[in-house]
Image: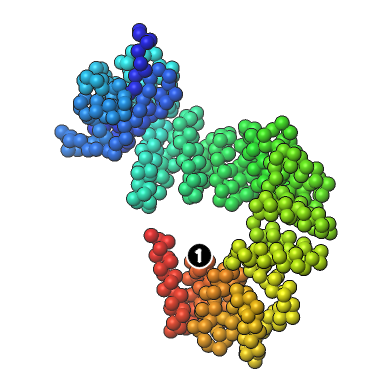
Amino acid sequence: MRTDRPRPIVAVIPFGARGASSRAGAWARQIARRLVDRFATDATVELRPVFLVAIPEASDDAGYLVFGSSPEPDLAAQYASSLGATHALTATYREEKVSRTLDAALVDAATRKSIATATLPIAPGRLQQTEPDLAAWLVGALGVGASTDVAKTAAATEEAYAALLEAMDEEVNATLLRASDPARARESLRTALARYIDAARLDPDAAAPEERLLVIAAESLERGDTAAELTALERLIEARPRSWRAHYILGQLRAEGGDASGAVVAFEHAHSLHPLPDTDLVRLAELYANAAAPAPALAHLRRIAPASAAYGSAQELLAIISFQRGDLAAGREAFANAVAAGATSWELHASYGAALHARGETGDAVARYRDAIAAGSPGVVRLNLARVLLAGADRDAALGELDMILSGETTGEVAGQARRLRFGLREPELEKELERAGQAALAGDATVLDAAHQVFERALGVDPDLWEARFGLGIVARQRGDATVAQSSFRQVLELQPEAALRALDHAAALRPQEPAYIADAGFAHLRAGDLVSARQRLERAAHLDADDPITKSYLGELERAEAGKRA
């Protein structure tokens, strides 16, 4: 045998099928794909897949279903040349009444002629043997000694192998349909996942179905839609409870979905079966901390040695947890270790600052908060710094920090709190009046509406973006029956402070359960927050109480447009 010739490259064309079984086409196409996967790491021969959508062929028997592609040698050679291959492999899976075969042909790309053919019999219950038989024939026809184990089957039984092939075919369908028909793509994905589970159960030792399930689950993290994959992994673990990788990927999906406790359970199972890398143990510790379980978090972190690449992040998290627990001594030690190892995140400095502030060490707390800001912390840290400065009686410095926040942020919770704190520092007496006027307006005291209105206007003269004052004007307008002004005020509030406005409007509606205007406004707030279910509940109740209210009708129209957009 010659050993100095170039390594052969074979273009594998999706196999065609002629048979009465509705599954024949899927089997044929995916046997071709399995063959490519089998030789993926082979050093002596390379197989490259030809990607074709199923092309029907003529059939002599009208009762037969025809799938896939079985091109003539000339066209097969063209496919090979387009991939830079030296050969092309074609095949047709055939089902007769009493027999099954795979007719294979190896085509030379240069001469465009078939150089080897074979008819491989498929015994009853031995579909799984077709793939290794074809692999053995191919390396023999090429005259190479493959490093691949050509004799090993992908599954021990025909039932398990058939489930694997059908799952692979549905997975391809899901990929092809994802952009054009998402609903059908999801259906194909669910079918694929179910058949992979079937294959894993039918053959507990088969690696391929588990591999594909784990790949699909990992890919779902990028799409952000993991519901079907979560269920599939849980079913896989029922069938294979000692699969550490299944537990591990399940932990990742649960963590991504916000299920910290469930992720902890999955990661701990994975860790008990196969020790996780230190970086994953840091993540596990963080999940414990988020689930209000600091003790096991600290236990994991303390086991990470200084020589580990994850030591710095482990000490950083250990310091943060210690500071949050009020253990300043342990926190300081871990803080020093983290900084020495190069960990200098804003969270580390901010947690240190909070711990120092809680102990009354204002000066040091200010320094730590300033370090957090220098490390790129969000506005909430600067807001906390302003509060620490106020605790230390440094009013001017606190106002400077609040001005800094509001120069970069105009909406949201942090901006709203900073604006109210600054307002109170500048106008302490007016702030007290604002508080009383807001309570009176929410209580529905009609005798103080004029006075409350004046207080709200004076407050807006000091800060036109003070959401509490705008909300108060909206409540006053509702009390007076001025729906247009009320709606305009609430829209402005929802733009400035959506979360606070939502709470306030819900509270106003709760105080007046039989007044449709307030219920409708609360529904509108939920609509703007993206909670369409809660919005519909409130708006339908408001419409039931007053079917002719034009503002409620306007809100419902906006809701219907949002629901239609979500369905699309």
Q: Quadrant of residue 428?
A: bottom right
Looking at the picture, tell me which residue is in the foreground, 397 or 531.
397
Instruction: Work out whether residue 511 can be spotted.
Output: no
**Residue that sits furthest to the bottom in the current view:** 447
Left or right: 437 in relation to 337: left
- Residue 341 appears at what percent x and percent y? 72, 38
Q: How is the image coloured?
A: rainbow
- Residue 343 appears at what percent x and percent y? 70, 42
Left or right: 86 in relation to 155: left
Q: Quadrant of the C terminus?
A: bottom left
Rendered view: 150 above or below 200: above
Looking at the picture, tell me which residue is in the foreground, 38 or 110.
110
Looking at the picture, tell me which residue is in the foreground, 196 or 372.
372
Q: Tell me what residue is drawn at x 44 percent, y 24 percent.
A: 41
Rendered view: 225 above or below 154: below
Q: Which residue is mark 1?
A: 530
Q: Tell me what residue is drawn at x 54 percent, y 70 percent.
A: 495
Q: Quadrant of the N terminus?
A: top left
Looking at the rendered structure, the kind of residue marked 1 is Gly
- Residue 503 appears at what percent x and percent y? 61, 71
Left or right: 173 in relation to 254: left
Q: Tell me what residue is drawn at x 81 percent, y 59 percent.
A: 362
Looking at the rendered structure, the secondary structure element under dot 1 is loop
Instruction: Work out whether residue 260 can be spotted.
Output: yes
Looking at the picture, tell me which residue is in the foreground, 149 or 382.
382
Q: Tell me what residue is drawn at x 31 percent, y 15 percent.
A: 141
- Residue 199 appears at what percent x and percent y? 44, 35
